[in-house]
């Protein structure tokens, strides 16, 4: 029994020792580099995956500098554990790159050539970026691509390289624009918010834009715009950091006559390219501050609305920022003076202050009752003017129609009827209301009042006398010659008559039509 107990104790102690030894043994360090799922070459959009195992290896690779690889690959740590680290390398563009030799303790990852080839499904065109950037301005990165079918999905994302770059840049990824089916245009706006020493120019790296495309099988392609450096130009030292650097376009609109002691609205519209919305808001606040100096007006809380849109210009795309400023106000006097309103901004070409002003002026405010009375009077006056214009237009039209009908008349009787129709249109409420009641003598009697000159009336007498002779007397000429002579006399009369004088006199008749 004692011997059995001793043997059992030795076996348990042996097992306990093995457990203690196994707990103190660390997993062996190892490095593995896995490439494309489609073959030996790496397709643009795929990633190289570097897997590091072992606690010592993980600690080393957490601070490992990959040197030249950073220029050609986006390095992203996707899985970190105490004894395993997985790092993905996404290529920026096609080409051949050398993955360097990595030696870690007894583990050695040999140098190898990585060939990145064109993606068979997605082709992305990155637009060129400008070479220079003024402080407080924006840069627009645009890309164009086409998806193979509706089963593919586009997911734009903003990708920042590291914490220091994240502190310097603010990225806004706009919604994709789809000009045609399955074709997209993506835009990323970069705003530099780091500190720049006055009068010092330097180069800054612009973050990469990340575009993710979901394939029908649920996996993703990852595309990154190549890292670019840009010359950053600071503002002159005498300018404040929040100055608006842009070619400003603005408009102001307020009522010509405002309503006394009632709420009126003053609208301002400001537009600038590639600027931060906050700078436009600062300028709008300055306008509100200047207006608040007018004490004869109660200024209510203003409203601001920002709209952002893309605009294509020579050299690339720009982001157009539009600010709509609405200022409600309530006048407390019938007459009040608005001061000069100054808009100050920095001209990006000259890098100097530029001031545009809305000149001072007097404004009229009327009580609501007076305002509406004037509105009604203006409306009635407008109706009267339209009515007179209609009279003049119809009178002139009837004159031109009479001239045309006289020249196209086929007989003397038809020519006279054209004259009778014209006069009846001018005097519809005269003695005779129908053409059948008209006579040459009555036509001449009425025309004597309308004639613009004695010469015109004499020519009209000759015309009527000759027309009566043609109708009732036997002339030694055939009918065709008589008609032509009558047309000539009619034309001579029309040339001596002033059409505009007849039109003016038409305004004094009760009706033209």
Image: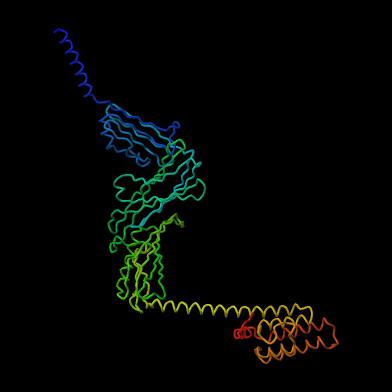
How many numbered marks does the figure carry?
0
Which residue occupies the foreground of this view, 96 or 76?
76
Image spot of residue 274 (x, y percent): 39, 57
Which residue occupies the foreground of this view, 277 or 416?
416
Image spot of residue 334 (x, y percent): 36, 79
Considering every residue shown, the one lying at the far left of the view is 2
Image spot of residue 178 (x, y percent): 48, 49
Image spot of residue 219 (x, y percent): 43, 36
- Image position of 291 (left or right of 388): left
Colour approach in the figure: rainbow
Q: Quadrant of residue 392?
A: bottom right
Q: Is residue 12 above or below residue 222?
A: above
Q: Quadrant of residue 454?
A: bottom right
Query: Could you tell me which quadrant the N terminus lies in?
Result: top left
Q: Is residue 187 above or below residue 513?
A: above
| Residue ID at (41%, 40%) | 222
Q: Is residue 264 above or below residue 306?
A: below
Query: Could you tell me which quadrant the C terminus lies in?
Result: bottom right
Which residue occupies the foreground of this view, 492 or 124?
492
Q: Quadrant of residue 97?
A: top left
Q: Is residue 372 above or below residue 283?
A: below
């Amino acid at each position: 029994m004692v011997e059995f107990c001793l043997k059992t104790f030795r076996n348990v102690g042996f097992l306990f020792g093995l457990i203690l030894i196994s707990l103190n043994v660390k997993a062996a360090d190892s490095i593995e580099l896995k490439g494309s799922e489609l073959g030996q070459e790496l397709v643009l959009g795929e990633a190289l995956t570097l897997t590091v195992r072992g606690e010592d290896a993980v600690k080393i690779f957490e601070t490992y500098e990959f040197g030249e690889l950073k220029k050609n690959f986006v390095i992203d740590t996707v899985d970190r554990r105490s004894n395993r680290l997985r790092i993905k390398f996404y290529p920026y563009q096609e080409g051949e790159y050398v993955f360097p030799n990595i030696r870690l303790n007894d583990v050695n990852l040999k140098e190898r050539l990585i060939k990145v080839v064109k993606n068979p499904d997605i082709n992305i065109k990155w637009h060129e970026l400008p070479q220079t950037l003024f402080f407080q301005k924006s840069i627009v990165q645009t890309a164009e691509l086409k998806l193979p079918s509706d089963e593919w999905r586009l997911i734009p994302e903003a990708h920042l390289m590291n914490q220091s770059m994240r502190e310097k840049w603010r990225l806004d990824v706009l919604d994709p624009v789809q000009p045609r089916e399955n074709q997209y245009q993506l835009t990323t706006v970069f705003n530099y918010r780091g500190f720049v020493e006055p009068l010092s120019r330097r180069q800054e790296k612009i973050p990469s834009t990340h575009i993710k495309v979901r394939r029908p099988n649920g996996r993703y392609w990852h595309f990154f715009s190549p890292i670019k450096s840009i010359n950053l130009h600071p503002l002159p030292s005498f300018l404040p950091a929040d100055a608006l650097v842009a070619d400003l376009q603005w408009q102001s609109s307020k009522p010509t006559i405002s309503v006394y002691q009632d709420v009126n609205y003053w609208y301002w519209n400001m537009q600038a390219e590639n600027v931060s919305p906050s700078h436009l808001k600062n300028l709008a606040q300055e306008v509100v501050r200047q207006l608040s100096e007018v004490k004869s007006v109660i200024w209510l809380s203003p409203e601001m609305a920002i709209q952002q849109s893309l605009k294509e210009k020579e050299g690339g795309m720009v982001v157009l920022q539009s600010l709509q400023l609405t200022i409600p106000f309530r006048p407390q006097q019938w007459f009040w003076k608005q001061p000069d309103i100054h808009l100050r901004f920095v001209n990006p070409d000259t890098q100097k202050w530029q001031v545009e002003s809305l000149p001072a002026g007097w404004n009229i405010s009327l009580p609501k009752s007076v305002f509406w009375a004037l509105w009604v009077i203006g409306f009635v006056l407008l109706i009267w003017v339209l009515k007179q214009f209609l009279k003049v237009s119809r009178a002139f039209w009837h004159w031109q129609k009479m001239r045309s009908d006289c020249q196209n008349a086929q007989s003397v009787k038809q020519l006279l009827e054209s004259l009778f129709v014209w006069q009846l249109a001018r005097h519809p409420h005269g003695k005779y209301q129908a053409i059948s009641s008209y006579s040459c003598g009555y036509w001449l009697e009425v025309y004597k009042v309308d004639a613009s000159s004695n010469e015109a009336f004499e020519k009209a007498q000759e015309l009527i006398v000759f027309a009566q002779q043609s109708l009732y007397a036997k002339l030694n000429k055939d009918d065709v010659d008589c008609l032509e002579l009558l047309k000539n006399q009619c034309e001579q009369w029309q040339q001596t008559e002033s059409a505009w004088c007849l039109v003016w006199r038409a305004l004094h008749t009760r009706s033209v039509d």
